[in-house]
Image: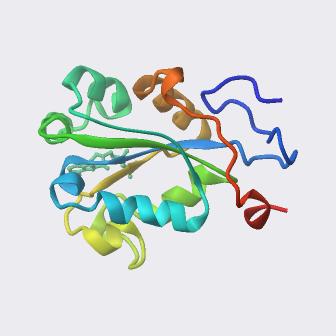
Amino acid sequence: DVSNNFGFGHYSTSSGIAGVRERTLIAVKPDGVQRRLVGQIVHRFEQRGFKLVGLKMLKASEDLLSQHYHELKKKDFFPYLLCYMSSSPLVIMVWEGHNVVQTSRMMVGSTNPAEANPGTVRGDFGIHVSRNVVHASDSVEGAQREIQLWFNHTELIDWDCCDHSSTYE
Ligand code: ADP
């Protein structure tokens, strides 16, 4: 029951296992791109077994970023956040797999790198909350909203990964 390409389908066409079609939005923020961390971050998601279904580099507008971060509009750091996030290019990606939203949040670590566990992206590469290297959607619904905001459906690729049966039952 795969309804469209935005990650609303939660059942795999091939194996019928619930949840393997879940998708999340991961972004390497300007500090991560500047520090040449894109490869290491992509590697962690590939190594975990998730499937890359969309990827692009862009310089985001403040307008798009204020839609993305609409829940934070009243925060005093909001103008600084928009300034930082629009300062240089982002690499934004959509990753697919079982429980990918929750697992990605674990892999990325706490918002404040000072509190993030070693082994997480933020815990390994960050010091300060204002430069925390990476974004990961925080819920399945949030991921669907963010994927639609950042990607056109033609930019998301449905493909069969040859190691599927080594990753899932
Ligand atoms: P997360 O990115 O972990 O989901 P939030 O949605 O709370 O966290 O915040 C969004 C982003 O805003 C953070 O990733 C970080 O870049 C920035 N941010 C959050 N809190 C602060 C802060 N106190 N000062 C500066 N920037 C912040």
Residue 64 as seen in the image, left or right of residue 110: left
**Number of marks in picture:** 0
Residue 82's x, y, as percent? 19, 34
Quarter of the image for residue 118 reads bottom left
Point out the image quarter for the N terminus: top right
**Colour setup of the view:** rainbow
The foreground one among 73 and 142 is 142
Asked whether residue 33 appears in the rendered view, the answer is yes
The foreground one among 52 and 106 is 52
* 54 lies above or below 29: above
Q: Kindly identify the residue that appears in the image at 67 percent across and 53 percent down.
A: 99
The foreground one among 117 and 51 is 51
Residue 54's x, y, as percent? 48, 38
Q: Kindly identify the residue that appears in the image at 84 percent across and 49 percent down.
A: 17
Point out the image quarter for the C terminus: bottom right
Residue 47 as seen in the image, left or right of residue 118: right
Residue 3's x, y, as percent? 75, 23
Q: Kindly identify the residue that appears in the image at 46 percent across and 66 percent down.
A: 44
Residue 8 as seen in the image, left or right of residue 61: right
Residue 125's x, y, as percent? 27, 70
Q: Residue furthest bottom?
A: 118
Q: Residue furthest front?
A: 162
Asked whether residue 130 appears in the rendered view, the answer is no
Q: Kindly identify the residue that appears in the image at 14 percent across and 42 percent down.
A: 84
